[in-house]
Amino acid sequence: QVQLVESGGGLVQPGGSLRLSCAASGFSLDVYAVGWFRQAPGKEREGISCISNTYGTIYYADSVKGRFTISRDNAKNTVYLQMNSLKPEDTAVYYCAGSRIWCSPRSTEYDHWGQGTQVTVSS
């Protein structure tokens, strides 16, 4: 059965850090482009980062550039999102998603989705 599972969310103070994990089972994640999306209360779902399935090309939204880092560990069939210098505006449910084709900021381009993990940034 194809499945993606996010983990690593939680409560953190402004300026703190979290590392999110996206673990795949039932398929090989290394042949997929993997994107991270988030949705805050009252906001549209936002594509924030993606790592490609070919040359490892990486993309970041302006809202997270310089603070977040996406990476792969193919041996663990997992993609990570390291989040530093967190702000209250980063509070959202974070989702990972896989595409067999390419990275895209559009959620409709992705075939598989996790159920999300809550990140709350508050003092």
Image: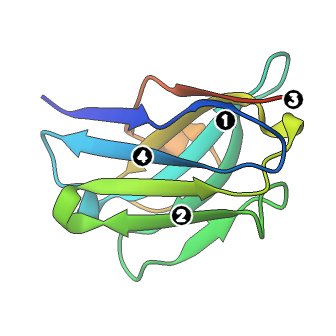
**On the picture, is 60 further left or further right than 1?**
right
- Circles 1 and 2 in contact, beta carbons < 8 Å: no
**On the picture, is 89 further left or further right than 66?**
right
- Circles 2 and 3 in contact, beta carbons < 8 Å: no
Q: How many marks?
A: 4
Which residue is identified by label 3?
A: 123
Q: Which mark is residue 18?
A: none
Q: Which mark is residue 21?
A: 4
Residue 60's quadrant in the figure? Answer: bottom right
Which residue is identified by label 2?
A: 70
- Image position, residue 104 (x, y; %): 58, 56
Mark found first going from the N terminus, 1 or 3:
1
| Residue type, label 4 | Ser
User: Which quadrant of the figure contains the N terminus?
Assistant: top left
Q: Crowding at label 4, few (<14), some or many (≥20) Cα neighbours within 10 Å?
A: many
Q: Crowding at label 2, few (<14), some or many (≥20) Cα neighbours within 10 Å?
A: many
Where disc 1 sits, the SS reads strand
Mark found first going from the N terminus, 2 or 3:
2
Mark pair 2, 4: CA separation: 10 Å
Which residue is identified by label 1?
A: 38
State the residue at coordinates (51%, 78%).
57
| Residue type, label 3 | Ser
**On the picture, is 8 further left or further right than 42?**
left
Q: Residue furthest bottom?
A: 55
- Image position, residue 65 (x, y; %): 77, 66
